[in-house]
Image (tube, rainbow, N blue to C red):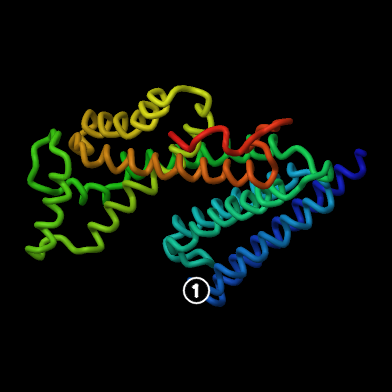
Amino acid sequence: MRRSSNHITTLIIILSILSVTVQFGTYYFLGATIYTIAIAVLVSLVISHVFLEQSLNYEPCFSYSLLNVFISVVITLLSFYGNGESFITFNTFLYLFVLINWFIPTIYSIIRCLFDHGPKYNRFTNFYRNNSIVFIIFYIVILIYIFFLDKSSNQFNNVDLKSLNIIPFLSFATFIEGYLDGVISMNVILNYLTKGILLFMPYGFYIILLLKNTTRIVRFLSLLFLPLIIEALQWLTNRGRIDIDDILLGLLGGFIGALCYHLLNSIFRIVKDEDFLTERSIYSFYRNSLHF
């Protein structure tokens, strides 16, 4: 048993180094292209499959993903602070490698768990818990950077409004007016909308996953909690004004994330006759309605 564990650990280290070398090597020769993304995804997918088949449990997939994410972050940071002297030229495209190295093993493991009707593979719950912890840490860091440290985010507050806006859609109307006057570009508006929604989708997913057995009002207030807190902290730290439109965008993102959880859970109910991460001996798919 120890020998098998040592074999898997060695394999994780070797294949992680190999996959990261292939990914960043492809970027070095091909640049930021769709082919680079395709090769990075394919490498991560194939190696995740190898680990699952070799170990018959999901934990090596987590170790592989964690090591890959760590190496990718280190290389990206070295490139960022290298002032052009690094062997890899920094580009925001490099962040995709970090995302791919976390996202692909996660999606692959979820799909394999979904269609695994026998006892062949195990420890999926441990895999998902550990993977979620790593993701949540990165997610918190990203939120702090974007909302409190990134100076470019101030461009979205650069409108002629009071420090407190409680009129729904007033900011949206101001952006549209600025676009029609040629003051604001469409890219700025789309970036504002996309950022406000996408950043809160993971929050909505995990909140509903954790609070799925609570009442609707508790889930709704929980989805509203993070957007409200971020707006308040931005105002207190002079990073922006309190804007109800930002809160509505965050709430919309949370609802979409919650919907993603419900869709995933419904697929597990149909295919495996059980809830996501929760085994059920007897289950009727039509027993409960879809709600937040």
Residue 90 image-quadrant placement:
bottom left
Q: Is residue 28 above or below residue 181?
A: below
The residue lying at 62 percent from left, 40 percent from top is: 131
Q: Determine which residue is flagged by label 1.
A: 33
Closer to the camera in the image, 18 or 283: 283
Q: Is residue 91 left or right of residue 160?
A: right
Residue 100 image-quadrant placement:
bottom right
The residue lying at 75 percent from left, 46 percent from top is: 60
Quarter holding the N terminus?
top right
Closer to the camera in the image, 45 or 206: 206
Q: Position of residue 149 (x, y in %)?
A: 32, 42
Closer to the camera in the image, 163 or 49: 49
The residue lying at 37 percent from left, 29 percent from top is: 220
Q: Is residue 249 left or right of residue 217?
A: left
Q: Position of residue 66 (x, y in %)?
A: 64, 46
The residue lying at 51 percent from left, 37 percent from top is: 137
Helix, strand or loop at mark 1: loop
Residue type, numbered disc 1: Thr
